[in-house]
Amino acid sequence: MRAVLLNEFGPPEVLVAGEVPDPVAGSGQALIDVEIASVTFVETQVRAGRPPHPAMAPELPAVLGNGVGGTVAAVGKGVDPALSGARVISTTGGSGGYAERVAVPAAGMIPVPDGLALRDAVALLADGRTATSLVRGAEVRPGETVLVEAAAGGVGSLLVQLARNAGARVAAVARGRRKLRLAAELGAEVAVDYGEPGWVEHVRDEVGDVDVVFDGVGGEIGRAAFDLVGPGGRFCPFGLASGSFTVIPDELAAERGVTVVRGAPPTPEDMQALTRSALAEAVAGRLRPVIGQTFPLARAADAHAAIEARDTVGKTLLLARG
């Protein structure tokens, strides 16, 4: 089968399409004919040899990709044969997704609801559960003001919608007019370019103190956003698009009366429930995953390059077939 191989760490060009043996469904597993694979920012860091955590660096050669959608082609021992032919999404355990087929634990597969496109389901697989978990953990309430960083990204675009659906006023920050327009279309009342000088003051002039910050950028942007949180507010760091997480000393947060929300790692059951919730919201028409760009599987390197160049909006997907 065709897959995208990582033989060495480096720039996007080290991702090269090639032939690898077909996987086999072992006991408790199912084999998925992959149609769509998710691409994440973290995978670009892993490819470059700079993973957020050293344990995330794979042994080489490797096939990246932790989220896929497709059709169950076969099942292993102990798995209900009736699953064959089902349309599903699934995580892969951290690798193997940039390929035409992948074997995954059958218990972790999630059926794609009727009426939902497969690509939308894949776009919600990880980003949907992340955004849902963040909004629940922050306990966003009606009438509050919520600041979403990287508001045109895969997670950020969902956070804008979920916070709005919770009754909050949303202030979005992103870089560039295209991304600001998207955030406004999704429901942000205020959209500010954090690439411009004085963006913090601009946000403060528009909305005053904010009650919740969803920090998907980290670094200097995240630290500046923390200063916008008023007493009793919540600061929720979850991403490092800048290359580093935001570090907020506990004593500073206590002095400001701000709670830094660091959720406990979800169990596999929690992750499934969160993803299913996001899928249900999409089916109901209350949540729209933004799929900004797709690439053929063999062009995974181009997908990585686009993400690193900050040229993407919403979710980036690889099309493994067709």
Image (cartoon, grey):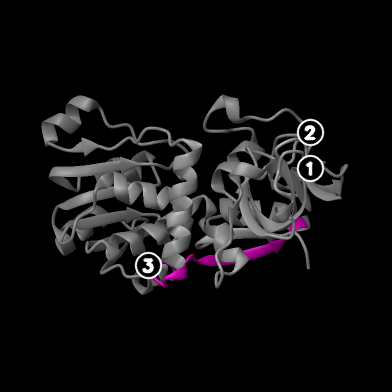
Side of 205 relative to 82 (left or right):
left
Residue corresponding to mark 1? 5
Q: Residue at x 59, y 33 (%)?
A: 50
Q: Amino acid at mark 2?
A: Pro
Alpha carbon distance from label 2 to label 1 = 7 Å
Q: Residues within 10 Å of mark 3 (few under 14, many from 20)?
A: many
146 or 281: nearer the viewer: 281
Q: Amino acid at mark 3?
A: Ala
Residue, disc 3: 183
Q: First in sequence, mark 3 or 1: give its number.
A: 1
Indicate whether residue 160 is drawn in magenta. no
Element at badge 3?
helix
Residue receiving disc 2: 61
Query: Where residue 290 sits in the image (x, y, percent)?
Result: 50, 66
Give the CA separation, mark 3 to mark 2. Answer: 39 Å
Amino acid type shown at disc 1: Leu
Who's the residue at 26% across and 46% down the image? 138
Q: From which residue to which does the magenta span run?
A: 283-297
